[in-house]
Image (cartoon, rainbow, N blue to C red):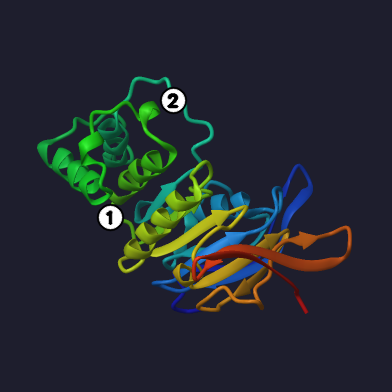
Amino acid sequence: MNDAIIKIEDVTFAYNGQKVLENVSMAIRPGDFTAMIGPNGGGKTTLLKLILGLLKPNRGLIRVMGNAAEKASHDIGYVPQDVHMNRHFPISALDVVMMGRIKPGRRFNKNTGKDRRVVLDALERMEMVAHADTRIGKLSGGQRQRVFIARALVTKPKLMLLDEPTAGIDSRGQADFFQLLKELNTEMTILIVSHDLLVISTYVKSVACVNRHLHYHPQAEITGEMLETMYPSTGETVCPVELVAHGLPHRVLTDHK
């Protein structure tokens, strides 16, 4: 774990005494592309917030790039879920990305010409520069996620965290989105949280199955040995992986032994 970009050891976290995560350990190395999957309420988003330093574990250790999680935030790009955004708010795609240039402790700092160039470069990279002046609520789900990634990129992160970014995007849009992430993965480590993972198998390098406990699979491809969801009612630990391989969608369901 010494060279891990994310190091988690025996982490337990509870909300109001109710354990959400218990004895969780995982190491993600530089250059990895990890998908975190599992059922609703299983602790995926909670673990993401712990990595971001927004929450602190009740027990255990979390280090991000060798530092305490809250001290590594300036090197992390974060793309949250899109579900709570007010799509009627009068803000353009360029303004959303410009928010990524706000420096800690300088909430109302004046934007500079350099800031604008960096923002436009990020939008161009995401193939969204033509929509720079478009109101964010008028963009499609896939276009909005590209804008949110551009906002994360202007901080020049070493680690990108994404929380269910493909929700509301159709199958073809999801394939395009993961192709984009694959390109970004040549420059940064990526951890993506998903509930229903629909992805071309060659894009993801490893999988973490989370449902209070965590099972990490370092496989380079999602195969028939990958696992999907945990079913506490049966006492079995199972991971369902829904994926597209060689153009054919199929489901993998295997027990954890």
Labels in figure, total: 2
Disc on res. 122: none
Q: Secondary structure at mark 2?
A: loop
Q: Is residue 11 in sight in this rendering?
A: no
| Residue 5 placement: quadrant | bottom left
Q: Secondary structure at mark 1?
A: loop
Measured as percent of width and height from the top left, residue 66 is found at 43, 68
Q: Give the CA distance from mark 2 to mark 1.
A: 27 Å
Q: Is residue 127 left or right of residue 1?
A: left
Badge 2 amino acid: Arg
Q: Is residue 182 left or right of residue 16?
A: left
| Residue 231 placement: quadrant | bottom right
Badge 1 amino acid: Lys
**62 lies above or below 53:** below
Which residue is at 35% across, 58% downward?
A: 180
Q: Nearer the viewer, mark 2 or mark 1?
A: 2
Q: Nearer the viewer, residue 127 or 31?
A: 127
Name the residue at the front extreme: 248
The residue where tag 2 is placed is 87
Q: Rate crowding at label 2 as few (under 14), some (14 to 19) or many (20 or more) other CA atoms within 10 Å.
A: some
Q: Nearer the viewer, residue 65 or 230?
A: 230
Measured as percent of width and height from the top left, residue 72 is found at 41, 56
Which residue is at 54% across, 63% downward?
A: 35
**76 lies above or below 113:** below
The residue where tag 1 is placed is 156
Which residue is at 21% across, 47% downward?
A: 124
Q: Is residue 80 left or right of residue 109?
A: right
Q: Quadrant of the C terminus?
A: bottom right
Q: Is residue 75 in sight in this rendering?
A: yes
| Residue 177 placement: quadrant | bottom left
Q: Is residue 225 left or right of residue 163?
A: right
Q: Rate crowding at label 1 as few (under 14), some (14 to 19) or many (20 or more) other CA atoms within 10 Å.
A: some
